[in-house]
Image (tube, helix red, strand yellow):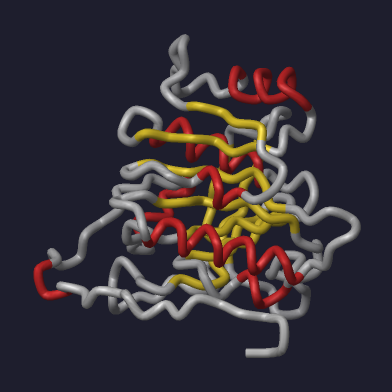
Amino acid sequence: RRDGYYRLIQDSVLPLDWQSKKTKVDSGLILPFNLREYVFIYPKTVTVIAGSKSSGKTGFLYRTIVLNMNKIHTILLSNMEGGEEQLHDRFCAITDVEIPNPAPFTVFPVMDNYHDYIKESKTLYIVDYIDVPDTMEFYMIGAAITKIRKKLASLDGSIAVVGLQKPSNRDTAYGGEQTLKDSTLYLAMNSGKLKIVDAKIPANRKIHPKNMQWTFTYDDEGTTFKNIQPCIEDTDEPF
């Protein structure tokens, strides 16, 4: 307590009946690059894809939508960079998966406070992408992810995949290591290369996927990934 500052005492929390929960409950989330072959993802968790400019980050997020749209209620929270017309064209460029009309997912234009829009159970939330206004500091990006993770904790079976911008010469997004701490899976994407920066739960306990990498090409719209090949990190060059 400081003079002039007060808060309510929060002591009404109920104990958890954790022993009644099932073992190894999978979120069912499908990710591009067959990433679920390497990582286990629980419900109520956040996956982060940090991409440098024009690396394919939005394409990864849009492809995640179409891979899951017929399996789980899916909502895209988009900052609408490029406008509705570009969003339309990029989804239409996905020709290997049919998107019916009306589309089986919902798009909301959202610029900030993404956690306020995360309120439905058994829902996949795609966030493209978290940025900060010019008047704010990059450390707020990590705080925004924390708010999303806390909101998911109160919902039954929901999950989030969040896009972030990153510099091309490092794996972590603007906001640094603070953007790592609340993710169950953290991916870095540069032009033509995807890397698993961190994965809390490997799909195979004997093979940890941290630092696994793949090269790829993609079409002009950046929504179809081709020629995906595993690769070995060149330690002489930054990712």
Q: Residue furthest front?
A: 4
- When the figure is inspected, residue 174 is found, relative to residue 99, above or below; the finding is below
Q: Residue furthest right?
A: 135
Q: Residue at (33%, 63%) from the top-left corner? A: 40
Q: Residue furthest left?
A: 20
Q: Quadrant of the C terminus?
A: bottom right
Q: Quadrant of the N terminus?
A: bottom right
- When the figure is inspected, residue 156 is found, relative to residue 168, above or below; the finding is above
Left or right for 65, reference 193: left
Q: How many marks?
A: 0
Rendering quarter of residue 21: bottom left
Q: Residue at (55%, 48%) from the top-left corner? A: 116
In this view, the residue in front, 86 or 149, is: 149
Rendering quarter of residue 184: bottom left
Left or right for 22, reference 46: left
Q: Position of residue 56 (x, y in %)?
A: 68, 44
Rendering quarter of residue 97: top left
- When the figure is inspected, residue 121 is found, relative to residue 50, above or below; the finding is above
Q: Residue furthest top?
A: 101
Q: Position of residue 106 (x, y in %)?
A: 50, 27
Q: Residue at (73%, 29%) from the top-left corner? A: 220
In this view, the residue in front, 180 or 121, is: 121
Q: Residue at (48%, 62%) from the top-left corner? A: 149
- When the figure is inspected, residue 14 is found, relative to residue 219, above or below; the finding is below
Q: Position of residue 31 (x, y in %)?
A: 44, 47
Q: Position of residue 67 (x, y in %)?
A: 42, 35
